[in-house]
Image (cartoon, rainbow, N blue to C red):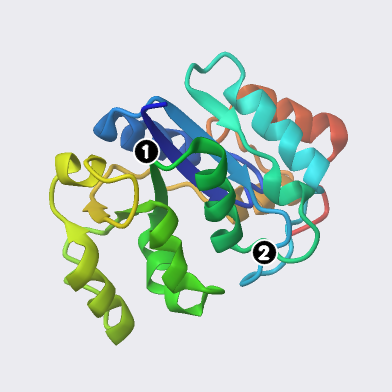
Amino acid sequence: MGVVLAFGGTFDPIHNGHLRTATDVAELLGVAQVRLIPCGQPAHRSPPVATAAQRLKMLQLAVEGQAGFVIDTQELARSGPSYMVDTAANLRAELGQPCCICLMMGLDAFLGLPNWYQWQKIPEYLNLVVMERPGWQGGQHKALQSLLAQRQVTTTEALLSAPAGKILLVTVSKLAISASQIREKISTGESAEGLLPEAVLELIKTEKIYQNQA
């Protein structure tokens, strides 16, 4: 397999911001496959509002008919907290050593990386694609500064030349949409039209997901 782009999150719910960003990064890297990996039990944030089954169903509806998107349910099937280091190791074991695997993450997630379980091992299994904000001059955490000094590359060619171990900072257009914003709108009876795929919104209405919940 060529290049695989991994995108993890609670997807509570999946929305157009997620899909747009994943598509933009996929086009930038020229990837063969985008793997959406719904988190089972977040280790560093509050539990999702929707059930695992509901979040999976929303993901399936969101990517139906979209070439290149697949859903990886390994974290939903795993008991206990969802640690990215375990997911990364599983991806490497499944896809093989030559495969270039890139994990895309937002800047805030990257800045919190030193708080992740066994975070130093993650680059051993895959590359990191960090969606930086314009004007950001680099992390203040010494461990991140050291990580960037050792592993940062500045071109997609350099990133894709290695199956793992590299970090590329990219700037992509980002829609001003958040899952918490959508949940709040639905909870208060406001319209969420245009913020997420129509099929996902219909499921939310039918199953009354997020109603009366902030």
Mark 2: amino acid? Pro
Residue 61's label in the rendered image is: none
* Residue that extends furthest to the front in the rendered view of this protein: 97
For disc 1, the neighbor class at 10 Å (few under 14, some 14 to 19, many from 20) is: few
Residue sitting nearer the eye, 37 or 205: 37
In the image, residue 11 lies at what x, y percent? 62, 46
x then y, percent, for residue 122: 45, 62
At 58% from the left edge and 24% from the top edge, which residue is drawn?
63
Residue furthest to the top? 65
The quadrant of the picture occupied by the N terminus is top left
The residue pinned by badge 1 equals: 98
Tell me, yes or no, if residue 194 can be seen here: yes
77 horizontally vs 11: left or right: right
Q: Which residue is mark 2?
A: 42
Give the structural element (helix, strand or loop) at label 1: loop
Q: Is residue 15 visible?
A: no
> Secondary structure beneath disc 2?
loop
Residue 182: % across, % down: 62, 47
Relative side of 161 to 107, left or right: left
N-terminal label among 1 and 2: 2
> Callout 1, which amino acid?
Pro
